[in-house]
Each structure stands twice: as structure tokens, then as C-alpha cells.
Image: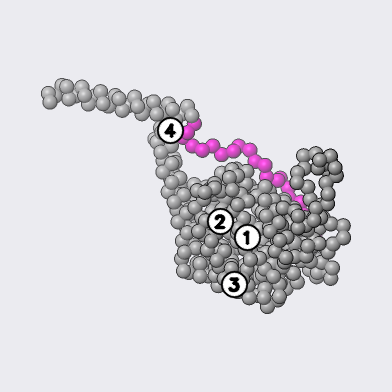
Amino acid sequence: MPIKPFLLSTVALLIGIMISLAVVEVGVRSFNLDEQKLPDWEDRPHKYFLHEGVHSLQDQHQALLKSKDTLRIGVIGDSFTFGPYLQVDDTFPSRLERWWNLNKEQQKVEVINYGITGLSTWQEIELVKKALSEDVDMLILAVTLNDPELVNYNPSDNKVNKFGQPIADTWLRREWKTWHLIQDRLENYRSVSKYKNYFHDLWYNNDTYGRFQSSVKEIAELSQQHQVPIVAVIFPTFGFLNDQSYPFFDLHSRAKEAMEAVAIKTLDLFKGYRHIPLDRLTVLPGRDRHPNEIAHRIAAEKIYNWLRHKNILPKKIFAKTVSPNRTSPLFQTNRTRLKIASADAAT
């Protein structure tokens, strides 16, 4: 090929590439695709209201000595049980306590929140011992997918964390938004991959899963020794959409298998959150994945209805009056007052 036509072809190719890149850059800037914008608002409480005289932010207001006419339930867990950024009465243990005290003539029910942020199951053995020493009548063990950890770690959505590396703020990244977008997408892909691998390793590694199994066995033995029934509930992570693309179904199964191996009845809460956008379920969308008030209320409903049919707790503590909806202040079902629903009939 003669030199001149070759140069012209090369120049034309370069011009075409530059025009294409310019078009892409304009598109990226126009549609604001260079970065995910975090909400500029926040709906977390400014102050947290506690019972007078409590000694911890768990707000354990119940008397140390249980009265004879009281049914006491202890909830064991980590931050998902404790409820960071929530008013105390919005956590699922507090909701359960309210709903188990709705009838006029019934036994008083206390639900004590023993949740402590960052604990793994092997550390929760001490919480179980504490609850049993405080004369609980039943235990609820809340399981999250980082429970097999040997060393505490609370994953977050920040770029600088265990699952991702900080992205250098270079001139090229600031000025060339397309490159900014490509870097972010690559880093997000790597972070998600590390996140999935991390949790799968926890549940398939002999050391971590073995420690989880032995801890669950010890907790079950402690409850049997004290003749206190125990159940477990499994929370999903709130880092992925809760639909069929959720990557941790097998981990839920392994958690349930470990529980059932020591005769602990177990409820998987995943279905309660299926198809709900994550921004509706987390305390700080894009920044903190802990469940918010909506997620805690859903958990409480699922646990309440599940336990009602398990014949572990007295039927008399479950609400006798139940309405299928609440859009009007009037009890109406075909123009007649809603009949008092029995606990067995409620769903």
C-alpha cells in the first residue's frame, strides 16, 4: 500500500475512534452514569428514647427477677437483633413483646433483646448462658450469614473495605467520565465477587462451619439442660436483591441443616423479603445494609405467625382480635363488625 493512502486511512480511523469516544463521553455525562448517587437525605432518628434506668442501649427494661405470672422470651443474636439506627421499640424483639400482650386476660410476656453487634455464634453461647440464668422460658436464636466468623467483621458498602480497594482519584478519572464509569464497574464486579466468595467460604470451610456446628450443638445442649425450648430464625443478607438471583440459598440450607441436626426448629425469613427493593429494607441505603424498621416488622410478623402454629408458646398470648386490613377506622366485613378471630384462624 502506498504511504499516503495508508496515512489517510490511519488518520481517518483515529478520527473515527475519537468521535466515537466523544459521543460515548457525552452520553455518560448526559445520563449521569459515571457514578451511583447516594441519597442526600437521611431518615434515621436524631435521638433514641429509652426506659428510665436502663444500663445498655439494648434497653433491657425488664426486672432481673421474673415475676411468677410472666412468660419470658430471650432473643439471642448480633446487630440484626440489636437493631442499630432504630428506636428500641422498632426492633423485632420489641414488636413481638407488644403483639404478645394485646389480650385483656392473659399472661404477661417479656421479650428481652440480648443482641450485641459483631458477635458470631460461638460468642453468643455466653449470651445464652446469661439468658438462661435470667430464667427465660424460651430462646429465639437469630442467625445471620456471617455467624460462622472466627474473627468479627461487619461488611459495609464503602469502597474502602474488605471486599474492595480504594480507587485513586486521578486527573484522568476526574476529567474522563467514561473511564470513571469503567473503573467503577470493574471494581464493583470484583467487590461483589469477593463478597460472594467470602460468605461461601465461611459456610464451606471446615474450620468456620465446624465451629458454627459445634456452637449450635452447645447452645442446644444448654437449652435442653435447663428444659428451655429454643428455635432459630435465619435472616438473609441485604446486599443483594431478594429474588431468584439471590446467591446464598445454599448457605441458608446449610444453616438450617446445622440447626435441625440438634433438633432446633428453624424459620427461614427469606420469603418475607422477596422482591422488595433493598432501599425499602435497609437503614442507610447504599451505606449500611442493616435491616430498617420495615424489615424488622416483617421479621416480627413471620416469627409471630410461625410460632403461633408450632405449639411452643401458649395460645392465649396470641392476639384474639385480628383484622385483614386497616384502611378505615371501622371494623367492617360485609357491613358487619369484624368477628373476633381466633389465634388459629389468623394468618
Closer to the observer: label 4 or label 3?
3
Q: Which disc number belongs to residue 154?
A: 2
Q: Is residue 251 left or right of residue 89?
A: left
Q: Tell me which label, 1 or 2, sits earlier in the chain.
A: 2
Q: Secondary structure at mark 4?
A: helix
Q: CA distance from mark 3 to mark 1?
A: 15 Å
Q: Position of residue 54 (x, y in %)?
A: 77, 60
Mark 4, residue position: 177
Mark 1, residue position: 267
Q: Please name whichever residue, 81 or 216, is drawn nearer the observer in this view of the structure.
A: 216
Report the amino acid beneath label 2. Answer: Asn
Q: Are marks 1 and 2 in contact (CB under 8 Å)?
A: no
Q: Tell me which label, 3 or 2, sits earlier in the chain.
A: 2
Report the amino acid beneath label 1. Answer: Leu
Q: Quadrant of residue 97?
A: bottom right
Q: Secondary structure at mark 2?
A: loop
Q: CA distance from mark 1 to mark 4?
A: 46 Å
Q: Tell me which label, 3 or 1, sits earlier in the chain.
A: 3
Q: Which disc number belongs to residue 262?
A: 3
Q: What are the residue bounds of the magenta stretch?
A: 32-59
Q: CA distance from mark 4 to mark 3?
A: 55 Å
**For residue 173: magenta?**
no
Report the amino acid beneath label 4. Answer: Lys
Q: Position of residue 117 (x, y in %)?
A: 62, 59
Tell me the crowding category of disc 2: few under 14, some 14 to 19, or many 20 or more residues within 10 angstroms, Cα based.
some
Q: Are marks 2 and 4 in contact (CB under 8 Å)?
A: no
Q: CA distance from mark 2 to mark 4?
A: 32 Å
Residue at (12% x, 26% y) in the render:
1
Q: Position of residue 203 (x, y in %)?
A: 49, 63
